Each structure stands twice: as structure tokens, then as C-alpha cells.
Image (tube, rainbow, N blue to C red):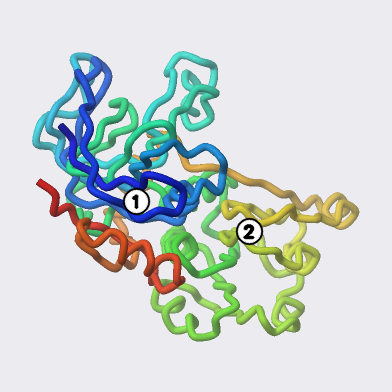
């Protein structure tokens, strides 16, 4: 039996819950959960904001733990090895996207907490291709959020082909943005952090930002006109899209990873200066492995707050209240 915390209905408190996972599939891996991040996506699923939650709901898709069992087809992991699991837990591995290395774009991709039970538990299972070894040098109690928040912004940098000579901005210095700042600084870019919270200026600069812009001042973006090559939007709130397009240089790119409401883009300005708009999800297993190695090399980790898993409801309230700086990690204390 697997012991977990589950919500019986939308928005309900998470309660102790046990289930029998059945026989381990030949392509599956089972992890003994050591740590699991609590992400805003878990809150959306808990509340059924996206209309696809099944109850009882066991969240948790930023898992780090020890491999306890591997199926007969799994070759890259062995029992006792430390590994992680993120938003995706499986894909068909045979379609055009999968064969081309874009398993994250597979039409049959399966999500760790959609229609199945995730990592708010003592153990969790997933297809072996999506369970990846954790490099030496990455702290297990902090690394979990890299498997969702981290790969979300890292994949955007890869997909946009950002170069180290470029000037980049990160909009929103939160769970995603604080990692994006660290990645872009290590990438070699000149980094500008943009936030509505002036009190984050010091933290953003300690994380690697060269510049900080308090965007509640409408003139702050005007002063950046025609100065940036890449803008990464990590927030899910409406923005003055024209203002952000204006601060891009010719051939600049505005890229979304946050679920910002329907951006209205000035087509004439974008066409005239060959500016582009893009968006991306979390990355493929290969890109996740690249990110983990990059983090180990540059000593990049999320800033985390920690709760025992048995105190999960307090952690949920802390996140809902907007108090997390910047990611929450649950440490497994279940039997």
C-alpha cells in the first residue's frame, strides 16, 4: 500500500489516504519520496480550476527520492539511486514527437497528478523515461522544484535560442522568475528583473540580476525602449503588452511561460521590426537532464521554505496566502 494525503473534493483539506498501486509495470519506476515541492499548479488541480481533477486527489509533481523498484525494461536507473519526477509521468515514446526528442509534446503525454496519484505520498510511480537521476552536488531537499518550475523557464531559454551576448528581462520575480534570473545570469546574459514589488530588488540582484525595474511606475518601461533581446513572462496577470513590445530590440522575442490572460499583440510593430512571440511548456527528459547538470555546474537551486508532509494543509494555506519565498518543499514523514 502507498500512504498519501488526498483531497476528497474540490478545495477540501488533504486527509490521510492509502491505495494499492498494483503490480509495477515493465517500463515503470517506483520512488520512495524524500521531498516533494508544493506548486501553484497543485493548488489549481486541488481546486479543479482547469476542470480535469479526479478525486480523491493526490497532488505533488516535484518529487525527489530514492528508487525502490524498476521494471524489466528500465535500464538507466537502479534501486537505491536518487532521482526526480516532474509534471509529466509518461508518453507514448513512439510518435513523431517522441522519436524526435520532444516527448513533452506527445499527444499521449501523461501528467503526474492528472488522473493518477502524485508525490504527496511515501511512494510514487511513473514511466521510467520521465524519472531522471539527480546529479551529485544538488541538495535533495531543495532540488524538487527544478523538475517543474526550473524546467519551465530553462526550456524557454533553450527553445528561444537565447545567446550569452543578449540582454534579457524576467517579468515576475516569484517561483518561476527567481530561477529564470539565476539561469540567465549563468547563461551569460545581462539580466533585468521586472517586478511590481520594489522590495524584491535586493533579492533579485543577489540572485544575479544586473538591473531591477519596479513596473508599477509606468515610466519605468518607457526608459527601457528598444533595449532588450528577450523578455520572459512568468506571471499569470494582464500586462501592458504594447509597453513590453516597445522595449524589445529589432528581432527581439517576447516569450510566455506564465498563463497570462490573452495577450493583445501589436501586429504592425512586430512585423515591422521582425519581433516574435512564443510560448513553451516544461521540457523533454533530455532538456531536464541538461538543466540538472547546468544547475550542478553553476550551483543553482531554488530558494525554498520547508514543511513536513504531515503539515501539508498549513503549507497549502501559506502558498494560497502568497507568502512563499519562493518555493515550498514538503519533507516526507509518512510511514
* Relative to 285, residue 314 above or below: below
**How far apart are the two marked residues, 2 and 1, measured between alpha carbons?**
20 Å
Quadrant location of the N terminus in the rendered image: top left
User: Looking at this view, is 312 or 331 the one in front?
Assistant: 312
Residue position for label 1: 294
* Residue 52, x across and y down, in percent: 52, 37
- The residue that appears at 74% across and 49% down in the rendered structure is 276
- The residue that appears at 13% across and 54% down in the rendered structure is 333
Q: Identify the mark at residue 252; answer none if there is no mark.
A: none
Q: Is residue 154 in sight in this rendering?
A: no
* Residue 335, x across and y down, in percent: 9, 46
Q: Residues within 10 Å of mark 1 (few under 14, many from 20)?
A: some
Q: Residues within 10 Å of mark 2 (few under 14, many from 20)?
A: many
Tell me which numbered mark, 2 or 1, is placed earlier along the sequence. Answer: 2
Residue position for label 2: 230
* Residue 247, x across and y down, in percent: 74, 68
* Residue 141, x across and y down, in percent: 21, 57
Q: Seen in the image, is 199 located left or right of residue 121? A: right
Q: Seen in the image, is 292 located left or right of residue 284? A: left
User: Looking at this view, is 15 or 199 the one in front?
Assistant: 15
Q: Quadrant of residue 318?
A: bottom left
**What element does badge 1 sit on?**
helix
User: Looking at this view, is 3 or 248 the one in front?
Assistant: 3
- The residue that appears at 49% across and 64% down in the rendered structure is 177
* Relative to 184, residue 70 above or below: above
Q: Residue furthest right?
A: 268
**What element does badge 2 sit on?**
strand
Amino acid at each position: 500500500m502507498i500512504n498519501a494525503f488526498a483531497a476528497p473534493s474540490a478545495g477540501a483539506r488533504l486527509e490521510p489516504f492509502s491505495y494499492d498501486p498494483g503490480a509495477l509495470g515493465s517500463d515503470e519506476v517506483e520512488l520512495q519520496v524524500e521531498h516533494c515541492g508544493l506548486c501553484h499548479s497543485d493548488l489549481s488541480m486541488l481546486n479543479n480550476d482547469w476542470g480535469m481533477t479526479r478525486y480523491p486527489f493526490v497532488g505533488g509533481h516535484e518529487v525527489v527520492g530514492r528508487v525502490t523498484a524498476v521494471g524489466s525494461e528500465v535500464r538507466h536507473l537502479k534501486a537505491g539511486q536518487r532521482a526526480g519526477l516532474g509534471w509529466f509521468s509518461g508518453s507514448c515514446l513512439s510518435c513523431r514527437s517522441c522519436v524526435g526528442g520532444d516527448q513533452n509534446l506527445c499527444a499521449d503525454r501523461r501528467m503526474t497528478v492528472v488522473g493518477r496519484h502524485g508525490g504527496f505520498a511515501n511512494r510514487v510511480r511513473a514511466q521510467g523515461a520521465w524519472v531522471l537521476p539527480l546529479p551529485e552536488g544538488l541538495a535533495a531537499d531543495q532540488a524538487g522544484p527544478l523538475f517543474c518550475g526550473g524546467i519551465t523557464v530553462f526550456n524557454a531559454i533553450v527553445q528561444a535560442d537565447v545567446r550569452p551576448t543578449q540582454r534579457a528581462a524576467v517579468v515576475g520575480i516569484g517561483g518561476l522568475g527567481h530561477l529564470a534570473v539565476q539561469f540567465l545570469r549563468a547563461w551569460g546574459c545581462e539580466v533585468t528583473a521586472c517586478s511590481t514589488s520594489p522590495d524584491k530588488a535586493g533579492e533579485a540582484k543577489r540572485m544575479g540580476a544586473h538591473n531591477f525595474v519596479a513596473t508599477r511606475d509606468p515610466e519605468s518601461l518607457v526608459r527601457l525602449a528598444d533595449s532588450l533581446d528577450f523578455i520572459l513572462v512568468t506571471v499569470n496577470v494582464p500586462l501592458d503588452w504594447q509597453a513590453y513590445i516597445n522595449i524589445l530590440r529589432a528581432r527581439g522575442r517576447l516569450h510566455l511561460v506564465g498563463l497570462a490572460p490573452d495577450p493583445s499583440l501589436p501586429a504592425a510593430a512586430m512585423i515591422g521590426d521582425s519581433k516574435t512571440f512564443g510560448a513553451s511548456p516544461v521540457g523533454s527528459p533530455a532538456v531536464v537532464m541538461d538543466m540538472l547538470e547546468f544547475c550542478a555546474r553553476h550551483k543553482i537551486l531554488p530558494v525554498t521554505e520547508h514543511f513536513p508532509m504531515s503539515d501539508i494543509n498549513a503549507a497549502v494555506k501559506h502558498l494560497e496566502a502568497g507568502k512563499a519565498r519562493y518555493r515550498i518543499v514538503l519533507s516526507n514523514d509518512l510511514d
